[in-house]
Image: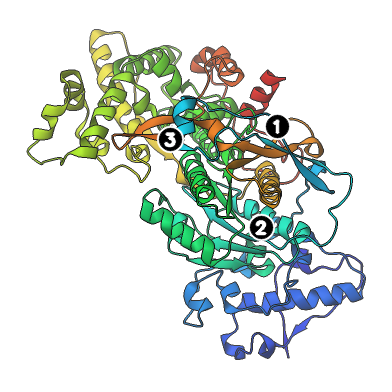
Amino acid sequence: MGELNYPNTNILKPINSHEIEFTVDVTSCNNLRPASVDPYTITATFIARFRTLAHSHSLSLPRSLAALGTTGTPMSPSFVYNGDLAAAAGGKPAGTGRVASVYSDVQTSRIDHDLPLPSVLKGPIKVVDGPPSSAAGNPGEIAKLFPCVFGQPSAMVVPSDSASDGPSQKLKIGVVLSGGQAPGGHNVIAGIFDYLQDRAKGSTLYGFRGGPAGIMKCKYVELTPEYIYPYRNQGGFDMICSGRDKIETPEQFKQAEETAKKLDLDGLVVIGGDDSNTNACLLAENFRSKNMKTRVIGCPKTIDGDLKCKEVPVSFGFDTACKIYSEQIGNVMVDARSTGKYYHFVRLMGRAASHITLECALQTHPNITIIGEEVAAKKLTLKNVTDYIVDVVCKRAGFGYNYGVILIPEGLIDFIPEVQHLISELNEILAHDVVDEGGLWKKKLQTQSLELFEFLPQAIQEQLMLERDPHGNVQVAKIETEKMLIQMVETELEKRKQEGTYKGNFKGQSHFFGYEGRCGLPTNFDSTYCYALGFAAGALLQSGKTGLISSVANLAAPLSEWTVGGTALTSLMDVERRHGKFKPVIKKAMVELEGAPFKKFASMRDEWAIKNRYISPGPIQFNGPASDAVNHTLLLELGAQA
């Protein structure tokens, strides 16, 4: 016998005042030698023992802890290393999985943060159909591309008068994380799993490893309570990992079909952004056209905030990412004011849309914020944008302020019409031609585009020519727009200084806040929202739905009043040119210049430009009055709808 040393006193502390001494027989852990037992294996075994002891002492357990070990199967090394294939096969473990025993106090407290559900999901439910759907654009083309699933109605989860008669059907469901990470993804998986445990007892949930490639290669792990436990309310996608592969060729669809048949899947949940959910709809169409039983449901994931509509008011991860970036921006603001000599040019992740930049501006009040959609609407050139920044810098210098903070959206360069046209031409060239070192390919550019390309700094030229991502997008995260603007502002200010119209001092500091926001501990909002999305996905699959995206709405109301359902993926679609061909895509939700969030920002930006109205929001809070605060964008948009 050996004493168990486990630092998480919050989990282990009995509810009543009784003191219980815990010991663990390490030799009972899957018949492993004591020396080979990982501390987390001991923890898992201990939790199972703790449940028995707690029951004998009439103690209650949090939902996540109470679910552990209920499968009736022994805990295996694959649990210790969280799905490591070598470990699962009995080989040498990689040791790269999560070890909850070394979690920080904050991580530990989040594991057993119990998640409430909307009232509609607490009792017996049924799924009812809404009106038929259409498409966001070109419905005729979308109908041709999706003859089996186009036009199907949305669905709503509503209370049922009584529970279903007889035992529930056991389901076999797969789940995949697709695309970039976003805080809350693990809770979507936990929500699906808990729904199946509660409403379809005996069901199996498979996690496809490494994104869509895991589906094609049939690489998966069976998810259990013990496996999921250390990931509850945690950031990242490392439970099963993600990937950016697409299932689009006949051979790839065939591979997906074979996997679905091999695992006898009743359903598949695709957790991803606009491109990934487009792929989910293509899979749903393919499976239905082959009369396969496998149904496909999507879940809205992207920190960019550009996957939303009336029925899907926000994509998960946006709330958390914006609060992480806003903390960093607030810190930079205090630094700028403290030194009094730097202009901080902060580029923010967000790919095409400027939602993150706008939200962070509303949270922090920077001196200058460039909104890409406004640049496009006003047909501003690079020089126009530069002059706007320079004008503000000159005005602030007149008040003795030789410092400031400037927010720039990641996709700015793609919003400037002249640059947008250049990128469009480059996409066509890269899709069909070889870019030779001699520069002969440049002859295929129109004169205006060639002049602009030659005008740009060499570094930006090289970044524009980088290989596109698997979805055909320019990799805007690698285009250092903030550094380009610093150079252009410096040049213009020097010119004005020589003309005698500028007498200040300018020093630029560049920042890119991007990957830091993708895997943070999800906020209370994202944690709860994602859990409900997972529950909703489970309900939709159990009711036989396919080609829908899980939706949770009425988010400005108390959580108990949130509504739950599914929206037809084809209703979000249009056609777009990708790799030189027209493809179906979910239409991105861009910043609306007539929308409430932008109007509020526009009404205050002139004051922010000259007066320092900086706000430092501080780190994300999980307890206290600010812990349940929802982002400005969502509240303003929902208020505008009311």
Left or right of 540, for residue 295? left
- Regarding residue 338, the answer to whether it shows in the image is no
Q: Mark 2 and mark 1 in contact? Answer it, CB < 8 Å.
A: no
Residue at screen point 76% across, 65% down: 65
User: Which one is nearer the viewer's eye here, 523 or 298?
Assistant: 298
Q: Which one is earlier in the sequence, the residue at label 3 or at label 1? A: 1
Residue under numbered circle 1: 130
Residue 267 percent location from the top left of the image: 60, 55
The C terminus lies in which quarter of the figure?
top right
Residue under numbered circle 2: 232
Q: Mark 3 and mark 1 in contact? Answer it, CB < 8 Å.
A: no
In this rendering, the label closer to the viewer, 3 or 2? 3
Residue at screen point 61% across, 48% down: 184
Residue under numbered circle 3: 584
Q: Which one is earlier in the sequence, the residue at label 2 or at label 1? A: 1
- Disc number for residue 355: none
